[in-house]
Image (spheres, rainbow, N blue to C red):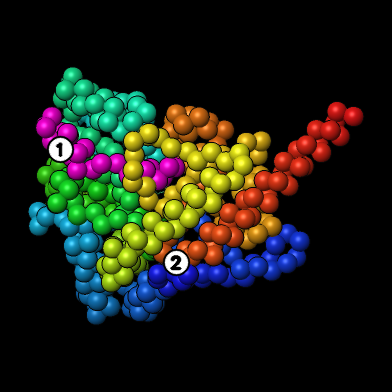
């Protein structure tokens, strides 16, 4: 834990604090967007000089780019443990991937109320199940819902973007399949931390974002079963998504291409795809065992440090969850979350996030409807980062409480 386990671009840059001091910056906001790995930056730099149109040109550079793009697709396919029949569609991000799938589901979807808005709003006219205080009770509620009426899909997050709690995906996949439904996993927060083998875990669809996987350039992934994707009309219509187009009378007659081309209209994001594939390769080289061990140490240190501070409450969904990825959200008695996050940045050069994390129902459900602070770790995090963060929270809370007390005394007098 003394050193980062991967070389992360821009790590530890000097920043100037509000009082003019310079300090080493600390990034504890990996769950929002992770910095690029140096290996990703190097790979993108290799490809950049050769950029030309993917799938659309006869020149050498075009051929090179088409090969790079399709090779990136194969890398992602392997990284997810996809089956040979599964398809990888490159999207803009997780949100785009989930909205795309929402257009393809031939029936009802069941979703929990703990989801990031990206995996809640696309299903807003479907069936939302309220989560219970324990994982076990939540599984029973999902089971009852799926038994009560058939659904085509169960859409769940792999790990909560607020509490980091990991859902029991094997059991959820069994549960969905027992009721004749498929399962989609929003892997935005899980994939950067854990190996996800969709075939072994029985996951039908997985969505994730490059920018949370150390490949921060506007690309994401939807991977999964081909049949639904090959039947639905694409929600993005345009060049590259068709086999044949003609005008019949006053209307346009279209023969849509099969997936993935069907859902990748327009010139694709080559560098985004290359960056994701490079990140997959580098994560494979570091090893998921090493990543999980590093994660665990950092998370334990974060939790240990924060819970030892007076007035800090760590947000948790379930009393019986045992597995979390490196995300810790918390509130502090008498301290405004936004003010704390701003002071951490301005006075200590530490980046965290404050707010409701695009998960308003979840925040209400855990009693933090006004928002919280979230610290999230990644491959560049060290013990020193965590220690400095905890100490900065301690002194900042003291001074913010002081200001409130002094302010209220002043206004009372
Ligand atoms: N799902 C989860 C669990 C997330 O944390 C996020 C990003 N905060 C998203 C979906 C959406 O990701 P993106 O903004 O990359 O589409």
Proximity of marks 2 and 1: CB atoms separated by less than 8 Å: no
Q: Report whether 412 appears left or right of 323.
A: right
Residue 172 seen by the camera: yes
In the displayed structure, 377 sits above or below 233; it is below
What is the x, y in percent for residue 396? 68, 50
Q: Look at 59% across and 65% down and name the residue there.
A: 25
Give the image quarter of residue 130. Answer: top left
Q: Residue 144: give its label.
A: none
Question: The magenta stretch spans which residues?
Answer: 160-182
How packed mark 2 is, by other alpha carbons closer than 10 Å (few <14, some 14-19, many 20 or more), is some
Read off the residue under disc 1.
174
**Which-is-in-front pick, marks 2 and 1?**
2
Residues 204 and 373: in front is 373
- Comes first in the chain, label 2 or label 1: 2
Q: Which mark is residue 1?
A: 2
- Whether 161 is among the magenta residues is yes
Q: Can you give x and y, in whole percent of width and height, for residue 195 in the image?
A: 26, 57
């Amino acid at each position: 834990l003394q050193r980062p386990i991967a070389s992360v671009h821009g790590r530890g840059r000097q920043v100037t604090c509000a009082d003019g001091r310079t300090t080493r910056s600390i990034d504890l906001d990996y769950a929002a967007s992770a910095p690029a790995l140096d290996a990703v930056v190097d790979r993108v730099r290799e490809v950049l000089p050769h950029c030309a149109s993917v799938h659309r040109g006869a020149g050498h550079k075009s051929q090179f780019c088409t090969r790079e793009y399709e090779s990136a697709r194969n890398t992602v396919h392997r990284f997810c443990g996809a089956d040979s029949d599964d398809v990888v569609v490159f999207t803009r991000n997780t949100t785009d991937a989930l909205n795309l799938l929402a257009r393809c589901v031939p029936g009802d979807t069941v979703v929990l109320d703990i989801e990031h808005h990206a995996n809640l709003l696309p299903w807003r006219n479907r069936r939302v199940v309220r989560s219970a205080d324990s994982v076990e009770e939540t599984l029973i509620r999902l089971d009852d819902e799926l038994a009560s009426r058939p659904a085509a899909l169960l859409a769940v997050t792999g790990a909560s973007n607020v509490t980091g709690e990991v859902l029991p995906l094997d059991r959820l996949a069994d549960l969905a399949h027992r009721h004749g439904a498929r399962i989609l996993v929003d892997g935005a927060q899980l994939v950067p931390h854990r190996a996800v083998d969709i075939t072994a875990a029985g996951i039908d669809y997985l969505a994730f974002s490059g920018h949370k996987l150390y490949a921060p350039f506007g690309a994401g992934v939807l991977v999964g079963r081909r049949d639904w994707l090959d039947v639905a009309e694409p929600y993005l219509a345009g060049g590259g998504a068709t086999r044949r187009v003609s005008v019949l009378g006053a209307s346009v007659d279209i023969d849509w291409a099969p997936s993935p081309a069907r859902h990748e209209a327009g010139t694709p994001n080559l560098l985004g795809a290359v960056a994701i594939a490079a990140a997959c390769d580098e994560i494979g080289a570091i090893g998921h065992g090493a990543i999980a061990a590093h994660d665990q140490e950092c998370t334990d240190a974060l939790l240990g440090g924060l819970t030892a501070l007076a007035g800090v409450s760590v947000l948790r969904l379930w009393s019986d969850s045992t597995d979390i990825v490196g995300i810790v959200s918390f509130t502090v008695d008498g301290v405004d979350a936004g003010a704390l996050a701003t002071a951490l940045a301005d006075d200590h050069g530490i980046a965290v996030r404050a707010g409701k994390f695009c998960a308003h129902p979840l925040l209400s459900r855990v009693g933090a409807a006004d928002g919280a602070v979230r610290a999230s770790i990644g491959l560049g995090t060290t013990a020193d980062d965590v220690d400095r963060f905890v100490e900065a929270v301690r002194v900042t809370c003291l001074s913010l409480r002081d200001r409130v007390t002094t302010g209220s005394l002043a206004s009372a007098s």
